[in-house]
């Protein structure tokens, strides 16, 4: 692409570094900014800058936070004995939306993935194991996505903590509510039969 | 969406103002930035800021430029008698890529569209008409997209300049090179027959 302006070219190149945004999309976005009032672009650029410079990660659960200890960890009403282990902050937001969990979280910051060069020491696993060692945690819910990397990470964590006095659980896999059986994949359907639950407990929800 | 950080929330809100970027995509992009080195986000934010503050529009053709007169208008090798009228800078880039036009451009900055509240006075039409009035232009190529708005804009410009000594042309509409006739829409196919060209001139290209 030949640009008539170096400033434009630089802005497009920087925008196209973002995942899923190619040169054409970047150009479309940048031209849109040029049509909008100047203040809008300055506000965006300022928001990104401040966020990148000042954002903190909660020292306990590694969730994104503006203060040292995030709102969830600082909330005295949460059950500190149950910890839900998730991959990133989006999972925390998704689970919080369901209002079905009142314990604390622990954000790993990714999954073990040798293909991408991510090993256990790149993730927040050590601090999780330390929490378990201190003995205040009674249950760990492993809520990683059910992929090869998720299973590897689950297993790695399990091996680290299995000698301590803590229950480990994983979220239920099964047919989504509202889905038709005939379209479900075999593995999910198979697991949903093996891990069937008493009918009485299903109608409580 | 409930955010654990105001800084994060602000960044996501600003990003989601961009066209085609919803809250979820914005969150994905912002979290990606947090995983990358700080310098990358600062470079992006600086590039957008500088661009928005310092970018200029060529005083002659209204193309985006870093200087008062853009490279194309300042190039003495270009034919200043033929002006190609386009909607925005992306069209200039697309036509320049074909290397088939050696005249100058005139960027309108949009199309007349009463539905979006864009009238002739919001576009760079007056400066175009002035160029024609000065009498140095022999041909205007109207290269707007062939939509209702494009046709309206073409017709508006035509009415303004038809009394001056200038040839007006529009780019050819027809079947794309490599396309099969049976899949072409009726209007395009019809026009391609009405506006057929001598076979000898088609094999020159």
Image: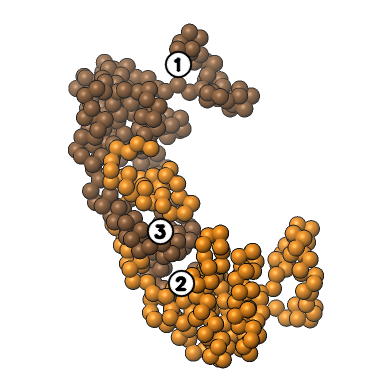
Chain colours: A orange, B brown
> What's the distance in space between the residues labelled 1 and 3, CA to CA?
45 Å
Q: Could you confirm whether marks 1 and 2 are on the same chain?
A: yes
Work out whether mark 1 precedes mark 3 in sequence or the reverse, and give the earlier one: 3
Q: How many marks do you count on the picture?
A: 3
Q: Split into 4 quadrants, where in the image is the C terminus of chain B? A: top left
Question: Residue drawn at (26%, 20%), measured in percent from left and top?
Answer: B79
Mark 3 closeness class: few <14, some 14–19, many ≥20 residues within 10 Å: many
Above or below, comparing residue A69 to residue B34 in the picture: below
Question: Residue drawn at (77%, 64%), measured in percent from left and top?
Answer: A189
Work out whether mark 1 precedes mark 2 in sequence or the reverse, and give the earlier one: 2
Do residues under tags 3 and 2 come within 8 Å of each other at their CB atoms? no
What's the chain of the residue with tag 3? Answer: B
Mark 2 closeness class: few <14, some 14–19, many ≥20 residues within 10 Å: some
Above or below, comparing residue A154 to residue A103 in the picture: above
Q: Which numbered dot is residue B3?
A: 2
The residue beneath circle 1 is B205
């Amino acid at each position: 692409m030949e640009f008539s302006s170096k400033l434009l070219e630089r802005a497009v190149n920087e925008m196209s570094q973002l995942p899923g945004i190619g040169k054409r999309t970047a150009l479309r976005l940048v031209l849109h900014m040029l049509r909008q009032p100047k203040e809008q672009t300055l506000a965006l650029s300022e928001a990104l800058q401040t966020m990148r410079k000042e954002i903190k990660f909660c020292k306990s659960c590694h969730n994104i936070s503006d203060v040292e200890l995030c709102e969830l960890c600082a909330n005295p009403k949460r059950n500190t004995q149950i910890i839900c282990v998730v991959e990133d902050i989006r999972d925390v937001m998704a689970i919080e939306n369901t209002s079905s969990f009142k314990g604390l979280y622990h954000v790993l910051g990714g999954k073990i993935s040798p293909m991408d060069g991510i090993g256990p020491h790149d993730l927040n696993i050590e601090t999780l194991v330390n929490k378990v060692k201190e003995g205040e945690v009674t249950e760990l819910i492993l809520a990683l996505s059910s992929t090869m990397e998720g299973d590897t990470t689950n297993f790695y964590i399990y091996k680290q903590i299995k000698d301590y006095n803590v229950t480990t659980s994983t979220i239920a896999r099964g047919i989504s509510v509202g889905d038709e059986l005939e379209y479900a994949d075999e593995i999910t359907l198979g697991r949903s039969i093996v891990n069937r639950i008493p009918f009485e407990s299903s109608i409580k929800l």
